Amino acid sequence: MIMLDRTKNLSEHFTLGELTKTSFKTEDNNDPPLEAVENLITLCENWLEELRYLYNVLYVLRPSEDYFTSRDVEPLIINQGFRSYQVMLRMKEAGLNPSETSNHMKGCAVDIRCMGIEHALRMMTILIDMADTNKRDFDELFLERRDTVYWLHFAARPKDNRRKIGFILM
C-alpha cells in the first residue's frame, strides 16, 4: 500500500488530510484511491475555494479589507470528505446510517461545518448562485442538523449530477 502525504494541498486552502480525516479507525486508514483524490481536487478547486472566498467577501470582511491580506478571513471547515468502504462499515456499527452508494465514497462530497442555521443558509445560497452563474451543476446540497449541530452536505460529480436540494433535520 502506498503511503499518502496527508499534508499535500489539493488546492490553495485544503489538504488531503482535511478531506480524509475520520474518527473511525480502519485498516485502510481511510486512504482514497487515485480517482477519489482527483475528484477531491476538482471539488476543492471548482467549488470550495470559491465558496470560501465569496462567503468571506460577502459576510466577514469589511469593505476596506482585502481577502488576500486580511487576518479576519474565516476558514471553511470540513467535517468529512472522502469515506472509505471500511469507514462506512464502522459508521454502521456505531449506529449511524451512511449510504453504501454515498458520493463521499467516490471523493465527490464534503460535509461543511456551520455555525448555525443562518451560516448554513448563506453558504447554501452562495453554492446555488455559483452553480447558476457559472453554468455548472452539483449533485446534492443538503442542510443537515442533528440536535443543535448544523452542517452542509455538498456533492458534485464528474457527470450525471442531479441538483438535489433538501433539508435533513433530526
Image: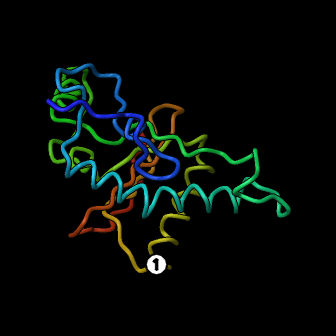
Residue 75 image point, x, y percent = 60, 44
Which part of the image, by quadrant, shows the C terminus? top left
The answer to whether 43 appears left or right of 160 in the picture is right
Q: Could you tell me which residue is drawn at 16 percent across and 29 percent down? A: 86
User: Can you say whether 39 is above or below 76 in the image?
Assistant: below
| Residue ranking furthest to the right | 64
| Residue 47, position as x, y percentages in the image | 45, 61
Q: Is residue 3 left or right of residue 135?
A: left
Depicted 3 relative to depicted 126: above or below: above
* Picture quarter with the N terminus: top left
Find disc 1 in the rendering and name its residue. Answer: 134
SS at circle 1: helix
Location of residue 35 in the rendering, given as x and y in whole percent from the top left corner: 19, 52
**Which residue sits at x=40%, y=53%?**
142
**Above-or-below relation of 12 to 17:** below
Front residue of 139 and 54: 54
Position of 41 compared to 149: left or right? left
Among the 4 quarters of the image, the one containing residue 122: bottom right
Q: Position of residue 51 (x, y in %)?
A: 54, 59
